[in-house]
Image (tube, rainbow, N blue to C red):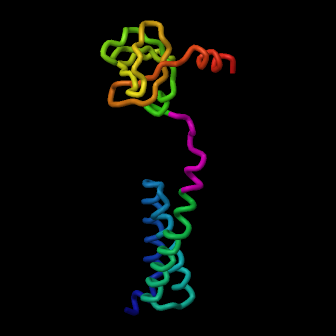
């Protein structure tokens, strides 16, 4: 036990270094908080606290940092993310043109991004669609775009803006 009291600072330095290396690999702030808790253990050891007290201080400090500092730090880090819609989310609301007549509610549309999709008429809209009609994607179900017809006045209003 005398050995732990005399050389605990070396163990703390080794742990801090290890936790910082792991943090560099994970980048999730968990091991950074544990390293800071270990720093608290190191400082308490340098102030003469026995080794078991150092462990308690390090554990409590690491836990407090994990619960109080890490969540707001992660939120702040992710706040500046790219707000652009991607993948399926970007297709919803997009307009397109019918390229194959709809038969029994199914056909094909070419979206404004140039992709051709198999499509079904949204259940609330029962009208048939023909080649050249304008449609808007309301949702995506698997590899099928659910579409609704776009009224001519609606399309012209959006073209003006």
Asked whether residue 51 appears in the rendered view, the answer is yes
Horizontal and vertical percent for residue 141? 35, 31
Query: Please, is residue 143 above or below residue 40 in the view?
Result: above
Query: At 37% from the left edge and 92% from the top edge, which residue is drawn?
Result: 1
- Choose between 154 and 81: the one closer to the eye: 154
Report the quarter where the C terminus lies: top right
Q: Main secondary structure of the magenta part?
A: loop
Horizontal and vertical percent for residue 97? 47, 13
- Choose between 95 and 4: the one closer to the eye: 95
Query: At 45% from the left edge and 29% from the top edge, which residue is drawn?
Result: 138
Q: Is-magenta flag for residue 79? A: yes
Horizontal and vertical percent for residue 56? 45, 84
- Choose between 36 and 78: the one closer to the eye: 78
The magenta stretch is 75-85
Query: Please, is residue 125 above or below residue 3 in the view?
Result: above
Horizontal and vertical percent for residue 83? 57, 39
Query: At 38% from the left edge and 27% from the top edge, which residue is drawn?
Result: 123
| Horizontal side, residue 43 vs residue 19: left or right | right
Query: Please, is residue 40 above or below residue 135 in the view?
Result: below
- Choose between 10 and 72: the one closer to the eye: 72
Check the image and name the residue furthest to the left: 104
Check the image and name the residue furthest to the right: 161
């Amino acid at each position: 036990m005398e050995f732990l009291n005399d050389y605990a600072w070396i163990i703390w330095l080794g742990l801090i270094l290890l936790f910082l290396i792991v943090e560099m690999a994970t980048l999730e702030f968990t091991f950074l908080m544990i390293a800071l808790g270990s720093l608290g253990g190191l400082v308490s050891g340098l102030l003469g606290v026995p080794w078991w007290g150092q462990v308690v201080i390090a554990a409590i400090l690491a836990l407090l940092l994990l619960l109080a500092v890490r969540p707001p730090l992660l939120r702040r880090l992710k706040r500046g993310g790219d707000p652009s819609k991607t993948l399926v989310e970007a297709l919803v609301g997009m307009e397109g043109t019918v390229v194959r007549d709809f038969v029994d509610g199914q056909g094909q549309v070419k979206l404004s991004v140039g992709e051709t999709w198999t499509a079904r008429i949204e259940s609330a809209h029962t009208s048939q669609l023909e080649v050249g009609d304008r449609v808007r994607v309301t949702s995506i179900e698997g590899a099928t775009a659910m579409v609704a017809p776009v009224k001519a006045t609606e399309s012209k209003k959006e073209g003006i803006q």
